[in-house]
Image (cartoon, rainbow, N blue to C red):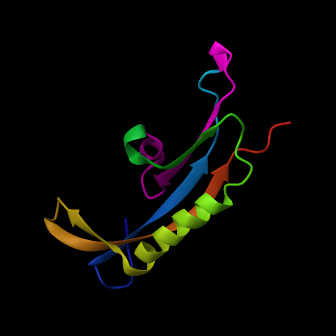
Amino acid sequence: MTHIGDDTKHRGCVLLMGCDGFEPFKKKGRKYSMWPLTVAVVDLPPWLRNKTENTFLMGLFGGPHKPHNFQPALKFLCNRMDTTIKNGASVYDAKHKEIFKLRWIIMGLIADSRGK
């Protein structure tokens, strides 16, 4: 975790968003797709970054067809996150037994390319 400026009470982390769809009922012959929107903490080592316990589910899109437009959901999510990016979120550090302000930045979005 990186420190923001010289103030050790403000720490930050880098996030990476990802979205990739799958068909949960493909074997049963039903047409339905699920598209989870996940976030991983880039500051973690690669062997820990993508473990289930270190990946956060930010949204889930589902329906009989692939979603055509993620923009409204991403805009809502980014607007909600913008407040915490600017102001930080109060987080408890169990190791040091203190509360600090956590800020983050979204480094990028990894998404599945359109199927052919």
Name the residue at the left extreme: 97
Left or right: 43 in relation to 75? left
Specify the quadrant that holds the C terminus: top right
Left or right: 48 in relation to 37? left
Name the residue at the bottom extreme: 6
Task: Say if the magenta span includes residue 43.
Answer: yes
Q: x%, y% of residue 20?
A: 64, 41
Q: x%, y% of residue 72?
A: 64, 62
- Residue at x-position 54% and y-position 67%: 78
- Residue at x-position 48% and y-position 46%: 46
Task: Say if the magenta span includes residue 36.
Answer: yes
Query: Which of these two is toward me, 94 or 115?
Result: 115
| Magenta stretch, residue numbers | 26-51
Q: Is residue 108 visible?
A: no
Left or right: 108 in relation to 49? right
Query: Which of these two is toward me, 20 or 54?
Result: 20
Check the image and report above or below for 107 versus 66: below
